[in-house]
Image (cartoon, grey):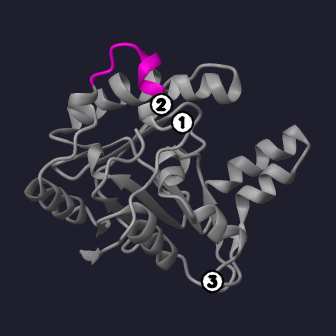
């Protein structure tokens, strides 16, 4: 398990939890958005690693988290795709790094998709994007026993998790840690979707959202395929 330290604190965005929770109605932020003690964080990181998922534990998002993510993607033509992620947005800087092609040769799959005006072709590209060389995603919950849980509406992110992406880079704040897998699924339903993500979707797309797909990473078979950048901050929801 690698340790990386940073200097700056992540900043909330327009669609961070703090700006959505007031309209979500009855969300238990005390239960679902707490940062556990250091012993729990380290025990959880070890449990995740026991499932063949590399954990990079960092102190802050904008320095340590961003640097860790960039370091995981090699030079030389790597195809990079990332799903919509409040955690990634709050971490800041990755969009710019991708546009600047900081390490040389990165291929921005998201830019290819957004540049396509034909709806059918764009949909086809989205389906292919889950098999990118490097797929980046936030998570919804991490059980202390090591399982990593994600959910979304259509599977545009979740499809990459089990097998499709050649390399999967997950980014999470320690506020996603909960005691058990049952708690992780409850966090998805009672905190992430529909309460908060539904609010964001209404603002951004003019329509609500719901859980259409769950994925639980219980054990990764391919050595080195999945990495989790775990940040000692409240990030995302």
* Residue appearing at x 54%, y 51% in the figure: 89
Seen in the picture, residue 9 relative to 18 is either above or below; the reply is: below
Q: Which image quarter is the N terminus in? A: bottom left
Res. 220 in view: no
* Residue appearing at x 60%, y 69% in the figure: 133
Identify the residue under disc 2.
Answer: 19
In this rendering, which labeled residue sits more in front, label 1 or label 3?
A: 1
Percent x, y for residue 99?
72, 68
As drawn, the label of residue 142 is none
Q: Residue furthest right?
A: 118
SS for callout 1: loop
* Residue appearing at x 91%, y 44% in the figure: 117
Percent x, y for residue 59?
29, 65
Q: Is residue 200 left or right of residue 235?
A: right
Q: Kindly indicate the quadrant of the structure image that contains residue 236.
A: top left
Q: Residue furthest top?
A: 25
Q: Kindly indicate the quadrant of the structure image that contains residue 232.
A: bottom left
Crowd band around label 3 with a 10 angstrom C-alpha radius: few (<14), some (14–19), many (20+): some
Identify the residue under disc 1.
Answer: 15
Residue 149 colored magenta? Answer: no
Front residue (pair 32, 121): 32
Residue 22 colored magenta? Answer: yes
SS for callout 2: helix
Percent x, y for residue 24?
44, 18
Q: Which image quarter is the C terminus in? A: top left
The stretch in magenta equals: 20-28
Crowd band around label 1 with a 10 angstrom C-alpha radius: few (<14), some (14–19), many (20+): many
Q: Earlier along the polypeptide chain: callout 1 or callout 3?
A: 1
As drawn, the label of residue 103 is 3
* Whole-number angstrom distance, CA of label 1 to CA of label 3: 29 Å
């Amino acid at each position: 398990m690698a340790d990386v330290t940073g200097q700056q604190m992540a900043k909330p965005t327009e669609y961070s939890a703090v700006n959505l929770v007031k309209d979500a109605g009855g969300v238990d932020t005390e239960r679902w958005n707490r940062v556990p003690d250091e012993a729990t964080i380290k025990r959880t990181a070890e449990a995740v690693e026991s499932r063949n998922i590399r954990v990079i534990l960092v102190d802050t998002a904008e320095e340590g988290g961003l640097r860790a993510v960039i370091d995981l993607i090699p030079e030389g033509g790597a195809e990079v795709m990332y799903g919509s992620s409040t955690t990634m947005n709050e971490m800041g800087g990755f969009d710019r790094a991708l546009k600047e092609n900081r390490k040389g040769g990165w291929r921005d799959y998201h830019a290819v998709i957004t540049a396509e005006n034909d709806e059918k072709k764009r949909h086809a590209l989205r389906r292919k994007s889950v098999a990118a060389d490097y797929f980046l995603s936030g998570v919804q919950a991490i059980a202390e026993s090591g399982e990593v849980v994600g959910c979304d509406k259509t599977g545009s992110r979740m499809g990459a998790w089990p097998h499709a992406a050649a390399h999967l880079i997950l980014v999470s704040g320690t506020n996603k840690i909960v005691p058990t897998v049952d708690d992780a699924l409850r966090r998805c339903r009672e905190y992430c979707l529909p309460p908060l993500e539904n609010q964001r979707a209404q603002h951004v797309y003019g329509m609500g959202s719901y859980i259409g797909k769950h994925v639980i990473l219980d054990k990764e078979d391919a050595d080195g395929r999945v990495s989790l950048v775990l940040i000692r901050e409240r990030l995302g929801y």
